């Protein structure tokens, strides 16, 4: 029996992140505060079934980023990242 993961790759979060940051965030890179792994956001594990979006580290499964949207506001918690490096458009 093959188990299907309950997450998508970080590309699934591209639309919400682009609406917040105004640029494609899939190639933005960060470092996990928990285990130190560095990765592009496209490589994270995206959980989209809850009231918001959660990106988890592919190495230690720690929460990297949470984003919740309401009709009037967006809340962002990126406390699981030591940094987030966003490429500038050419």
Image (tube, rainbow, N blue to C red):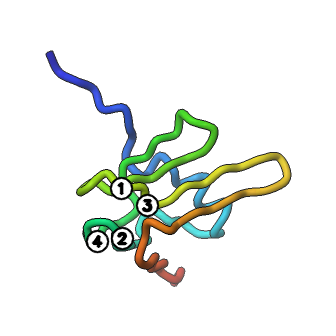
Residue labelled with disc 2: 33
Classify residue 70 as left or right of residue 89.
right
Crowding at mark 1 (Cα within 10 Å: few <14, some 14-19, many 20+): some
Q: Secondary structure at mark 1?
A: loop
Crowding at mark 3 (Cα within 10 Å: few <14, some 14-19, many 20+): many
Depicted 40 relative to depicted 73: above or below: below
- Asked if the residue at tag 3 contacts the one at tag 4, i.e. Cβ–Cβ closer than 8 Å, the answer is no
- Asked if the residue at tag 1 contacts the one at tag 2, i.e. Cβ–Cβ closer than 8 Å, the answer is yes
Residue labelled with disc 1: 62
Please tell me which residue lies in front, 90 or 69. 69
Please tell me which residue lies in front, 4 or 25. 4
Residue 38 tag number: 4
Q: Position of residue 24 (x, y in %)?
A: 53, 65
Q: Secondary structure at mark 3?
A: strand
Distance CA(mark 3)–CA(mark 1):
6 Å
Distance CA(mark 4)–CA(mark 1):
13 Å
Please report the residue visible at 55 percent of the width from the left and 47 percent of the height from the top.
53
Sequence-earlier tag: 4 or 1: 4
Q: Secondary structure at mark 2?
A: loop
Q: Nearer the viewer, mark 4 or mark 1?
A: 1
Residue labelled with disc 3: 64
């Amino acid at each position: 029996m093959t188990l299907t993961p309950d997450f998508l790759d970080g590309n699934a979060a591209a639309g919400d992140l682009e609406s917040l940051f105004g640029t494609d965030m899939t190639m933005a890179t960060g470092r996990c505060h928990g285990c130190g792994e560095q990765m592009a956001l496209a490589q994270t594990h995206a959980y989209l079934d809850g009231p918001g979006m959660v990106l988890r580290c592919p190495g230690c499964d720690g929460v990297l980023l949470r984003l919740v949207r309401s009709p009037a506001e967006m809340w962002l918690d990126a406390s699981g990242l030591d940094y987030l490096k966003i490429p500038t458009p050419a």
